[in-house]
Amino acid sequence: MLSIDGSHGEGGGQMLRTALALSTLTFKPFEMINIRKGRCVSGLKPQHLFCIKAIQEMTGARVDDAKVGCDKILFAPHKMKSSTISLDIGTAGSTTLLMQAVLPAALFGDKKTRFKLKGGTDVRWSMPVDYFSEVLIPQLRKYADIDFKLERRGYYPAGNGQIDITIKPKFCLTDYRNFEEFWQNVKADAPKINLIRQGKLLQVKGVSHASADLQSANVVERQEKAAKHILTKLNCPINIRCEYSTTMSTGSGITLFAIFSDGNDIDGEIDMSNPVRIGSDSLGEKGKRAEDVGKEAAERLINEISYNAPVDEYLSDNLVPIMAIVGGQMNVAKISNHTHTNIFITEEFLGKIFIVDEHNKNIRTVF
């Protein structure tokens, strides 16, 4: 059994989510101690328990000591099975953070898994739902057929947003006798992650959104206009969709994503098998002008693009567990602490896999 110190690096929920995913894939049980040590409130929070619950529903895994406030757990995975998992995280617990815990297993697990999740879709300290669907998911479609629907937005504090996602793997662990046999075949047959060049900027798209009670103040339109004003310097088409929703809490935000051709195509065509998309976002909050929300997201996007890398800071840590399975390399805008933490926890389960070039901001696998 693996013993993992949850105080390593960034620690926190990210380490637990990645450990749950890789334990499920590899069938290796683990014990984690010092979970979220050093935080204002250490130990497991309700949102972490829902990650564990989702994995338990996928596999029937055994979990010891999993309750709010605990700073250690023991997790023993069982065989994955096709299923529909319906969970209400409650309040504004992040649906996209929960998906981080189940994505690797769902991408390579059994024949099909469906997740119907209620909670926060656009909340602090997690990727917004539009970044999840428009930046992360396009990178994963080479490994699974993915059908994603945002059925309702959920803002802090009430949440009550809803997403529905069905994942049907193209490379199934359950077709093999064990993980090692599966892994050898996937390394040989699955397309690798190969994100080396940013390529030519083709367009910027996005979603400016808010709760319906902010419509009279034109919040969505003001966010969109401010973002467009900043983005005009990129000299490319800009298309930002405006959207109001009936929600339980007041909220707003904007997510932007820049779409590039692959670095090899002189005609500037999108490589659908290896897309290059860079994202940014900003959330509204009480006392924050809508114009500042739009401006913030646009300036963040321009900053990410300026690194001349095909992978933004936030995408890189999400791709690490996937790249560990299929192999490949990526040039990133920044090798963040979260990325280093994900590399650490991935290698706890799979051995030495990654070569990290800090100077050139390159991450590659040994295969």
Image: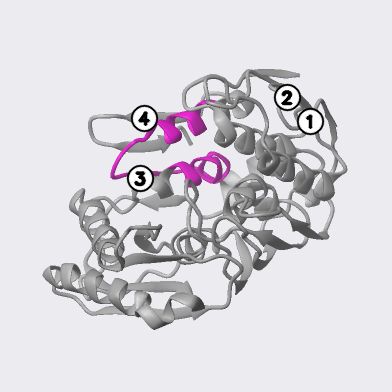
Let me know if residue 320 is in the magenta part.
Answer: yes
| Amino acid at pointer 3 | Glu
For the residues carrying marks 1 and 3, which lies nearer the camera in this image? 1
Residue ID for mark 3 = 313
Q: How far across and down, in percent of the image, does residue 104 sit?
A: 63, 48
The reply to whether the C-beta atoms of the residues labelled 2 and 1 are less than 8 Å apart is yes
Query: Distance between the Cα atoms at labels 3 and 4?
Result: 15 Å
**Does residue 235 appear to the left or right of 24 in the view shown?**
left
Q: How far across and down, in percent of the image, does residue 268 sit?
A: 24, 73
Q: Earlier in the sequence, mark 1 or mark 4?
A: 1
Disc 1 element: loop
Query: Distance between the Cα atoms at labels 1 and 3?
Result: 31 Å
Kindly identify the residue that appears in the image at 81 percent across and 50 percent down. Answer: 58
Which quadrant holds residue 28?
Answer: top right
Residue ID for mark 1 = 66
Query: Distance between the Cα atoms at labels 1 and 4?
Result: 34 Å
